[in-house]
Amino acid sequence: MPTPDDSAKPTRWAGVPAADRVAARRALLLDAALELLGTEGWSGTSVRAVCQAARLNPRYFYESFADLDDLVVALHDRLIAELHEEVRAAVRAAGADARAALRATVETTVRFVDEDHRRARVLYVEALGNEKLNRRRLETGFSIASTVESDAAGRNRSAPEGGRIGAIMSFMLVGAFSELLVAWLDGVLDVERERLVDDATEIFAAMGDAAARITARRR
């Protein structure tokens, strides 16, 4: 019985340098993982299923990934890197205004997941079902909280940065924003994207202000 890669043309990797072949196969596996995990979830995602979707022999899986957990964490990291690149560009375009930067961060994140709902499922839903993936989600989920703190610092003499209140706010924002996006994409929250961005920005800014006021009172 032919393996997935046997069905490909014999010249599939002909003339391609070894390092480029490995990188290309790794990208194919990540693309397949996004499709499977982002549509079918964990029940439809396995090493075999990923290899079949990528049309690759399983031996090529293990040249790039130790196991399935390693693959999905790499997928998460790729999505986060893509999101961060877009957020950084949007924040630069927003200029020096902290509130504009906050809105740009929220707007870019909303658009990123709205343009491809598979991204949201991987980042905010399926991550909860895997210990390694969920840990990585928490490690990389504080960019908006950091922007909120910067916004508050720009409008208040005392800011929550570096303190307990700032940490509490960060954890709250990460969880709340994830749940907000999932509910909106699922249709549970019926609101236009522009209104969602406007309202979320105002609420996040208010939380930053509140955290700054609490910090000021305790000094």
Image: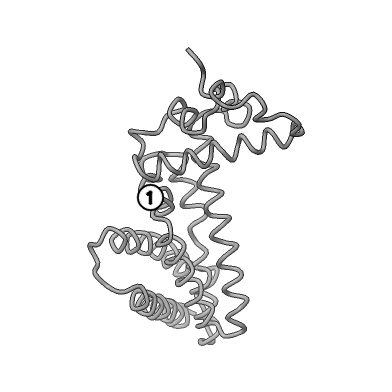
> Left or right: 87 with respect to 131?
right
Q: Which amino acid type is shown beneath numbered disc 1?
A: Arg
Q: Which residue is mark 1?
A: 121
Res 192 quadrant in image:
bottom left
Q: Residue at x 50, y 16 (%)?
A: 2
User: Is 188 drawn above or below residue 54 in the view shown?
Assistant: below
User: Is 138 drawn above or below residue 17 in the view shown?
Assistant: below
Which coloring applies here?
one colour
Q: Residue at x 44, y 66 (%)?
A: 111
> Left or right: 153 with respect to 123?
right
Q: Position of residue 206 (x, y in %)?
A: 39, 80
Mark 1: few/some/many CA within 10 Å (<14, 14-19, 20+): many
The one of 203 and 1 positioned closer to us in this rendering: 1
Q: Residue at x 30, y 64 (%)?
A: 184
The tally of labels here is 1
Where disc 1 sits, the SS reads helix
The one of 207 and 30 positioned closer to us in this rendering: 30
Q: Position of residue 177 (x, y in %)?
A: 38, 64
Q: Position of residue 123 (x, y in %)?
A: 43, 51
User: Is 198 drawn above or below residue 142 in the view shown?
Assistant: below
Q: Position of residue 135 (x, y in %)?
A: 47, 45
Res 16 quadrant in image:
top right
